[in-house]
Amino acid sequence: MRVNGVTAVRRSLERRDLLTLLLAAPERLLREDDFITDDSRRDYTVRRLAAHLNGDNMNIFPGHELHSILHALAEECRASGSVDQPPLKKASRRPVNNNLHSILRFVERIIRQRYETKTKPHNATDEDFLDDELKRYFGVKDLSFQIEEGILSLAFGIALDAVVQSVEGAAFNSTSSSDDDIVSGKRLISEVPPVPIIIPNNLPSEDIIKTALRIIDSAVLINRCMRAKLEQLQKAREKSEACFNDDITDKIKRYEHLLKPKKRRHDNRRNRSKHAPGYAGVVSAMEENHPRQWEWLQRVKRKLNEMESPSEPVAKSASVDVNFVIVRRRIETLDDISVSSNECDDVMHDESIKPDDFSKPDTKEDSSNFMPEPKTELEHVASFDPAPNSMEPTISPFEQLDRETHRLRLVLLDMPPGDSSSTEVVRHTVGEIVSLLGRYGELDGASGITRCGDILGGRLAIDASDDANVDGGNSKQGDQLSFDRFPLNDVTVSSLASTFLTDATGALRANAFLRSFVLPLMIEMNPTARAIYAGVSRACEDDDGMTMGGTEWGKPASRALTTLLTSLSRERPMECVVSVIIPSLVMTEGKPSTSSSSFEPTRFQCELISRVLRGKDALSVQAIAVLVETIVLPTRMGGPIGAMNVSTSYTGGGMKWTESTMPVLTACLNCKPPLTDDVVIELADTISNLLHPSGGTSSSSANTMTKSIKFSTLFHALVVKYGLQLRSARRVEPLLDSASMLRTFISKSICLALRKLS
């Protein structure tokens, strides 16, 4: 079958039917393990081109090979041998190339995939930098620039020839075949026929002309963009050389640009998408080399526009004095999608327009050119004063941002749970919070992001007296009742993290964001931790899965939270450990009056963290080492919160050793992070103390540990992974004595491993 396929390729090339091979290449012809000889080298190039087209990676195809293929296609379009002779009964019609439209669609596909929708590889940034440096140094003499410009010129020539053939055929069919201005046979690109006076409406090659004009417009626009970029690179080079030669001694002039106020950049993408970049004054190579052809194409476009214009009679504009009144309704964001059940009657009364106002002329100066400032998302929810008092004192930027954040919190708290997870609400909420975080970050950096999260989460109270009329004067009371409730759900925080955390976000801002927005989701899983963080001394009564026993309180992690924590551990491992995982396992904050000794991670929290540690995209070993060191070693300020609580269980450092937390430590040790000798010694001493009643724990707790499978698994992981450090620290004999007290089936394996170390 392979020999037959190669034979078909050769026959297809002999028939000059190159396009049929490119557009309909079978799968077996695209394999690159076929034998390559001198005779089949052209076949291999064609198959490789088809493979790049099918794989959407046309931008990495060699330019010189593509230039040769397009040159062959240009000759194919202008060759007289490719024109099919019509039958004798239609001798009066001018012959047209049957493959012309297919060739144009093929060229259009190449231009689109190579220049417009190209996919960049992983090292595209380095390649673009080197390419820009070459263009900056060589200018128009750059070889790659000349090749790409030649490819665009060939595409322009093929499309121009198609338009010429189509117009010639239409003129030939509408007039006699003996006209002197109709040229048959092979024709050069410089020979452009005049525009025919009459073009029939039922033009058989109308699609050909439209496709060719699209190719011409794309080629000219792309070439203008290339030349504009080259001109910018040349100007940048000249400017850098001029700046290098200048000896600037005045520091004020040198750093004058730093004193200028920064422009807002949150709407750059929006403005960039609305207004396409213009290349005024940039002339493409096609316009420069072929001015007569370009002027002729413009006449063809005008002629086609006249043909496509509707033939209906144009209604004459009557000279009647008509006063148009443009009513602009204020944009409602979340109110239109059931943020609140009722609307404010005062706002509706302000927006109502009396019928008598339509007859009154507008006497305000320049009122027709007035456009209201577009408001950000969710900003209009609490702005109930359409005409603010001009005598109101100026407030600080932080105060204004704090009020906006507080209003957003009230709106989110009043929202029904079903509406808060909808796509529209999540999108608008994320957009508004990202805008607030950007403004806070410009004012105070990472501290500003923390402040935004504290206000939005209710941990920082602000003066909301101006918003008292929003809920009938009960805004403070409602905020107090929901003080320990985080207003964002898992889906919103996951979308917010993917939008805000980018490669350009620094570690400090990432830590502030994770501690303010992701950590509250972990705290929501533990009612005791939520009460301690909120400063509530009473026991937290929650309906989300509360049972008897502190370790069973809380609720399991949602799928969105699991996915979020997994992605954070892969992309931001150190920030995820420091700002999310460690505060979930160890109580690092809290008021002195709170009963912090009752804090311990829940079973659902530990299962989530263990799943992240055992997953495919686990944390880095450096981050795991920081995690183990924090939850094992005691703090310098007299021990962590809840340490040495002998009435419940022994705490070996910052985390309580329970049936839920020990699998987390086991998962960390199985990853074998580089631990210091102090951490290994602390682990060994903790294990020995837990098994001996005289080590600071009760006999009942020691009896429980001797029968615990999870404790034995942790013991075994420490001995197997860090045996050499245990031997150098002289902890083998105490551990061997402790292992003999175990009553599980793993005790024999532990004793055997310790004897090998001794």
Image (cartoon, rainbow, N blue to C red):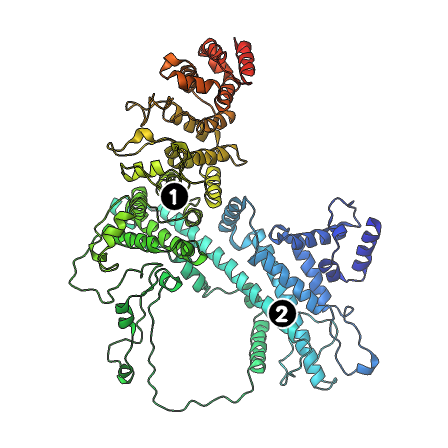
Q: Residue 738, image x and y in percent?
A: 46, 12
Mark 1–mark 2 distance (CA, rounded to whole Å): 68 Å
What number is the disc on residue 434? none
Depth check, front residue: 712 or 1 = 712
Quadrant in the rendering for residue 302: bottom right
Query: Residue drawn 47% across and 14% down?
Result: 726
Depth check, front residue: 409 or 430 = 409
Quadrant in the rendering for residue 583: top left
Residue that numbered label 2 is attached to? 212
Query: Residue drawn 55% across and 84% down?
Result: 310
Which residue is situated farthest in the front direction here? 548
Looking at the picture, which amino acid does disc 2 mark?
A: Ala
Can residue 702 be seen at all in this image of the molecule? yes
Left or right: 521, with 162 as reference point: left
Q: How many marks?
A: 2
Depth check, front residue: 217 or 719 = 719
* Residues packed near mark 1 inside 10 Å, few (<14), some (14 to 19) or many (20 plus): few
Q: Residue 431, image x and y in percent?
A: 39, 55
Q: Secondary structure at mark 1?
A: loop
Left or right: 109, with 620 as reference point: right
Q: Residue 370, image x and y in percent?
A: 30, 72
Looking at the picture, which amino acid does disc 1 mark?
A: Asp
Depth check, front residue: 151 or 550 = 550
Q: Residue 289, image x and y in percent?
A: 57, 66
Counting residues from the start of the chain, the first of labels 1 and 2 encountered is 2
* Residues packed near mark 2 inside 10 Å, few (<14), some (14 to 19) or many (20 plus): many
Can residue 163 be seen at all in this image of the molecule? no
Q: Where is 530 relative to 215, above or below?
A: above
Q: Secondary structure at mark 2?
A: helix
Residue that numbered label 1 is attached to? 543
